[in-house]
Image: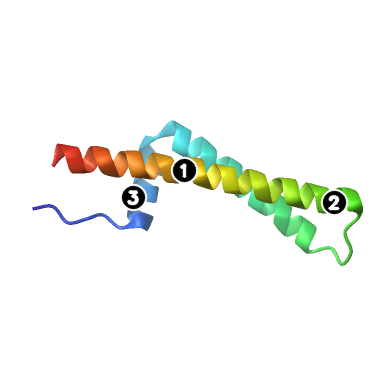
Amino acid sequence: MSVPIGEAELRQQLLSIDDEFKRLAAEHQSYDEQLEQLHRRHHLSDEERFQEITLKKRKLLLKDQMYSIVQRYRKEMKASS
């Protein structure tokens, strides 16, 4: 009987073995950093607010894609055990 792998451990494992997951995670991190820069400002222009909304939507899409990879990998692990 195998011990279930935790979410954080699984994500770390995928970062080292899955190029698509690694690319998505890097892009997600980039958007996160851009959002942090926007949040440091005291006042956002309309263009910056639009950029903030766009970045949040892109981050969410990437998170969903990464979650799909995690779920697919979990199924593969379960099937092979």
From the viewer's side, name the closer residue of 49 and 16: 49
Question: What residue appears at the point 35 percent right and 44 percent down from the top-left corner?
Answer: 71
**Numbered circle sitting on residue 48:** 2
Image location (x, y in percent) of residue 39: 77, 62
The amino acid sitting under disc 3 is Leu
The Cα–Cα distance between marks 1 and 2, rounded to whole angstroms, is 26 Å
Extreme residue toward the top, this view: 19
Mark 3 falls on what kind of element? Answer: helix
**Crowd class of label 1 (few under 14; some 14 to 19; many from 20; radius 10 Å):** many
* Residue at x 76%, y 52% (from the top left corner): 52
In the rendered structure, are the residues bearing label 3 and label 1 in contact, judged by CB atoms less than 8 Å apart?
A: no
Give the residue at x 49% y 40%: 65
| Mark nearer the N terminus (2 vs 3) | 3
The answer to whether residue 50 is left or right of residue 33 is right
Label 2 sits on a secondary structure element that is: helix
Nearer the camera: disc 3 or disc 1: 1
Residue carrying label 3 = 10
Distance from disc 3 to disc 1, alpha carbons, whole Å, reads 11 Å
Q: Are marks 1 and 2 in contact (CB under 8 Å)?
A: no
The residue wearing badge 1 is 66
- Three-letter code, disc 1: Met
